[in-house]
Image (spheres, grey):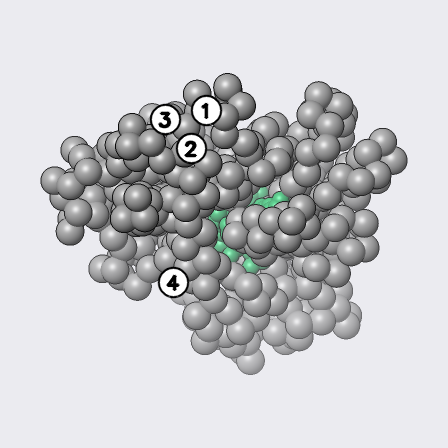
């Protein structure tokens, strides 16, 4: 599969390669993802972050794949929705927030298997702090890749005279992780090189998936934690 | 004696590994967990006291702060590095039987799941709490848990999972352990777990974090 340049318009069924620099991942974001207020991580963490951010750029191969589905392919029915004949059950809460969507973007993104290998190599140095910083950078990279896609979806929605919802992913709120299999059936085969295990784990590990709704009445949640049911999360703000 | 044990505890909590480690900056140039543990043993402090009043105190303190979201994963990892540096000196005493672990704890991430950071943190805190830890790794089958229990009868068991799709594999493992070793204490943990789920599958406890697992076991075997 050929990957399109990142500045190409959003096209249904396409997969995009995103440059590391375009994701503008910075040390403050990495500290935040670990639970610290930016600038509050103790020594030697800031130095390790700075060093590993440079290294990460050599191992990342960030890819984003998207499919766009228009009404009437999207049917909302209580807690379930049907997209191109595939039934998804995101639960009442997410379905409520998707109500009125005229179009949905279904996506998957990955930082690439090179990042998984690099993280393992950092743990193998025997310094678990390096390993954990690398792990957090990998997680943030793919989250930023999803942000990158979301911005393109917003532009696309504006072109349709629509607003967007937040990003919703299987495994969050009441949406069961096992629904990953249904979601992936809507994406191109082996989208961005991601495979799903029987237990719905994506490989490479640093991958995410989800959907974004578009419609004239759609709204984004101001704080993603408001939609998430995980009350014990160390990132809950 | 109390002073050196207190200093060991501080070095563990603050992640001060040895005299050459430059972190934390305010302890730069001072002895770390490595030197102080060696010195304490040379002074004649018993290995059990070094463990109980030095290492365990330091790890408990950082573990509690972690539970309260006052410190985060890197702080816990740095503390465990200092603890490992101290443990090197205690190991021969555990091997000779002069120092005793509180018990043995077998831990693994359940079948179908590859996550290990959370499990590793639990292992570190348990070890710092005076337990011998047998870490079976990730994607661990029920059979492997049973083999480990057969090799180390009387151990407690910890199961970790990061996704609801793998968490369900805990039920089978818990049932098999109960069938063969009914008195085994079983703790489950991981992001999608809840106390209700732990109860439903017949585990003894759900621990939201590593300190929770340690506190439960200390209470259960006391
Ligand atoms: C035996 O006794 C014990 C006792 C305590 C025990 C224990 C055993 N085992 C663990 N503990 C406990 O002690 C440790 C220290 O406190 C803790 O261990 P943990 O392993 O939980 O914690 C680690 C030390 C640090 N924690 C982490 O590294 C995970 C942090 C959170 C924010 C998280 C991250 C970073 C990521 N994720 Co995702 N992620 C979340 C997490 C939410 C959260 N706050 O935990 C979780 C795990 N993710 C979730 C989901 C759904 C997903 N993620 C995904 C992706 C990602 C990122 C790539 C962005 C990133 C990296 C993930 C990775 N596997 O490397 C996807 C799956 C990825 C895949 N490969 O398949 C995806 C499926 C979303 C999607 N559709 O794209 C949720 C799972 C819920 C569920 N229903 O199963 C989730 C709980 C978030 C949520 N708010 O709901 C405790 O749980």
Does dot 2 land on a helix, a strand or a loop?
A: helix
Q: Which residue, given by chain and number where applicable, does mark 3 sit on?
A: B89
Which residue is located at x 58 percent, y 53 percent? Answer: B215
Badge 3, how many Cα within 10 Å: few under 14, some, many 20+?
some
Q: Which mark is residue B47?
A: 2
**Going from the N terminus, do you reach mark 1 or mark 4 first?**
4
The answer to whether marks 2 and 3 mark residues whose Cβ atoms lie closer than 8 Å is no
Dots 1 and 4 on the same chain: yes
Which residue is located at x 46 percent, y 73 percent? Answer: A223
Q: Which residue, given by chain and number where applicable, does mark 4 sit on?
A: B70
Which residue is located at x 78 percent, y 56 percent? Answer: B199
Rounded to the nearest angstrom, the CA distance separating label 1 from label 4 is 34 Å
Q: Which residue, given by chain and number where applicable, does mark 1 sit on?
A: B93
Q: Which chain does the residue under circle 2 lie in?
A: B
Q: Can residue B121 be seen in this view?
A: no
Badge 4, how many Cα within 10 Å: few under 14, some, many 20+?
few
Which quadrant of the rendered structure holds the C terminus of chain A? bottom left
Which residue is located at x 61 percent, y 59 percent? Answer: A172
Rounded to the nearest angstrom, the CA distance separating label 1 from label 3 is 8 Å
Quarter of the image for residue A48 reads top left
């Amino acid at each position: 599969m050929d990957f399109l340049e990142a500045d190409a318009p959003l096209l249904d069924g396409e997969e995009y390669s995103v440059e590391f620099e375009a994701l503008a991942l910075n040390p403050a974001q990495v500290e935040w993802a670990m639970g610290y207020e930016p600038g509050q991580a103790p020594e030697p963490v800031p130095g390790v972050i700075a060093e590993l951010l440079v290294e990460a750029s050599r191992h990342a191969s960030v890819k984003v794949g998207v499919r766009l589905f228009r009404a009437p392919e999207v049917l909302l029915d209580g807690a379930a929705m049907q997209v191109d004949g595939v039934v998804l059950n995101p639960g009442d809460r997410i379905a409520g927030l998707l109500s009125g969507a005229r179009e949905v973007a279904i996506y998957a993104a990955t930082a690439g298997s090179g990042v998984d290998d690099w993280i393992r190599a950092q743990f193998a140095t025997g310094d678990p702090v390096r390993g954990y910083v690398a792990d957090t950078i990998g997680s943030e990279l793919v989250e930023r890749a999803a942000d990158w896609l979301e911005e393109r979806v917003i532009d696309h929605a504006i072109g349709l005279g629509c607003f967007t919802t937040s990003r919703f992913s299987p495994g969050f709120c009441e949406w069961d992780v096992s629904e990953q299999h249904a979601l992936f059936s809507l994406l191109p085969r082996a989208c961005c090189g991601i495979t799903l295990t029987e237990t719905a784990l994506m490989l490479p590990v640093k991958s995410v998936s989800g959907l974004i709704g578009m419609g004239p009445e759609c709204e984004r949640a101001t704080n993603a934690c408001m939609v998430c049911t995980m009350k014990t999360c160390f990132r809950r703000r | 004696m109390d002073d050196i044990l207190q200093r060991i505890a501080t070095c563990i909590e603050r992640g001060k590994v040895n005299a050459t480690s430059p972190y934390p900056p305010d302890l730069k140039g001072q002895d770390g967990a490595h030197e102080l543990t060696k010195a304490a043993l040379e002074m004649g402090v018993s290995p059990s006291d070094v463990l109980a009043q030095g290492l365990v105190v330091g790890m408990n303190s950082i573990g509690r702060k972690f539970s309260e979201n006052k410190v985060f994963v890197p702080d816990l990892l740095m503390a465990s590095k200092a603890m490992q540096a101290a443990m090197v000196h205690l190991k021969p005493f555990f091997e000779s039987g002069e120092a005793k672990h509180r018990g043995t704890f077998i831990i693994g991430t359940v079948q179908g799941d590859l996550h290990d950071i959370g499990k590793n943190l639990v292992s570190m805190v348990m070890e710092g709490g005076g337990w011998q830890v047998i870490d079976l790794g990730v994607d661990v089958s029920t059979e492997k848990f049973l083999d480990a229990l057969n090799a180390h009868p009387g151990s407690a068991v910890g199961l970790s999972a990061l996704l609801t799709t793998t968490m369900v594999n805990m039920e089978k493992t818990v049932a098999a352990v109960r069938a063969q070793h009914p008195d085994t204490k079983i703790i489950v943990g991981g992001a999608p777990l809840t106390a209700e789920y732990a109860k439903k599958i017949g585990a003894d406890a759900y621990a939201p974090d590593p300190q929770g697992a340690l506190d439960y076991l200390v209470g259960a075997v006391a």
